[in-house]
Image (spheres, rainbow, N blue to C red):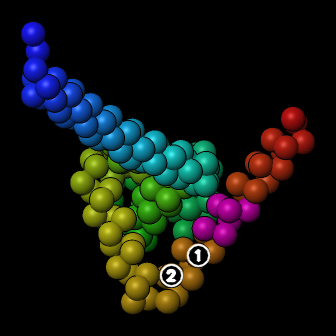
């Protein structure tokens, strides 16, 4: 026959087991909430980031700089155009660095990283260049809005 003490201990054990299950469920819920939050942020970034076709970026940059920046040369006017294109590709496409390198003729992904950083650094100290890049970005935004209007009209 079970005593009161035995039944009390069983109840305490059951209560401790329930508390442990609640803690585990709480951890799972927190992990799920974090995952959902991260998923929401990445989805929001996808929706808010303007995407421009790579060919259009190439066209806009080549028109602005007046050079074919995909040529294998280190001359400043070509390198400046190439670096600017890398920067714009990164801002207005979801292309991986390797693909940006292929479109711009920069070699590999590390060169693309260097080009993007260089553009950002130069824009900080050279307002003329910063204005030029801003003007290119305005062209990108105008093109994007034009694409959006066409899509809205087709729906």
In this picture, is 32 found above or below 146? above
Quarter of the picture holding the N terminus: top left
Which residue is found at the position 10% from the left and 20% from the top? Answer: 3
Q: Is residue 59 left or right of residue 86?
A: right
Is residue 98 shown above or below 3? below
Residue occupying the point 9% across, 28% down: 5
- Mark 1: few, some, or many residues within 10 Å (few <14, many ≥20)? few
Residue linked to disc 2: 130
Q: Is residue 61 magenta?
A: no
Q: In the shown orientation, is residue 64 left or right of residue 25? A: right
Q: Is residue 141 magenta?
A: yes
Q: Position of residue 61 (x, y in %)?
A: 56, 61
Label 1 sits on a secondary structure element that is: helix
* Corner quadrant of residue 142: bottom right
Q: Residue placed at 35% from the left, 44% from the top?
A: 30
Q: Are marks 2 and 1 in contact (CB under 8 Å)?
A: yes
- Give the distance between the C-alpha atoms of the residues marked 2 and 1, in whole angstroms: 6 Å
Q: Is residue 143 left or right of residue 118?
A: right
Residue 151's spot in the image, x, y percent? 81, 41
Q: In this view of the protein, which residue sits in the foreground, 62 or 138? A: 138
Of helix, strand and loop, which one carries label 2?
helix
Give above or below for 100 relative to 13.
below
Residue 11 in the image, given as x and y percentages of width and height: 20, 28
Q: How many numbered badges does the structure rendering display?
A: 2
Specify whether 50 is left or right of 114: right
User: What main secondary structure does the magenta stretch of the protein show?
Assistant: helix
- Residue 71 in sight here: yes
* Residues shaded magenta: 137-142
Please give the label number shown on residue 72. Answer: none
Q: Which residue is mark 1?
A: 134
């Amino acid at each position: 026959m079970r005593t009161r003490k035995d039944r009390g201990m069983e109840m305490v054990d059951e209560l401790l087991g329930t508390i442990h299950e609640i803690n585990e469920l709480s951890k799972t819920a927190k992990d799920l909430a974090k995952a959902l939050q991260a998923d929401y942020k990445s989805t929001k970034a996808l929706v808010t980031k303007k995407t421009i076709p790579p060919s259009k970026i190439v066209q806009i940059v080549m028109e602005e700089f007046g050079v074919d920046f995909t040529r294998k040369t280190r001359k400043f006017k070509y390198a400046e155009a190439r670096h600017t294109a890398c920067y714009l590709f990164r801002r207005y496409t979801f292309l991986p660095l390797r693909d940006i390198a292929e479109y711009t003729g920069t070699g590999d992904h590390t060169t693309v990283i260097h080009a993007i950083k260089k553009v950002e650094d130069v824009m900080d100290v050279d307002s003329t260049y910063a204005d030029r890049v801003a003007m290119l970005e305005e062209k990108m935004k105008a093109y994007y809005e034009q694409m959006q209007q066409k899509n809205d009209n087709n729906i």
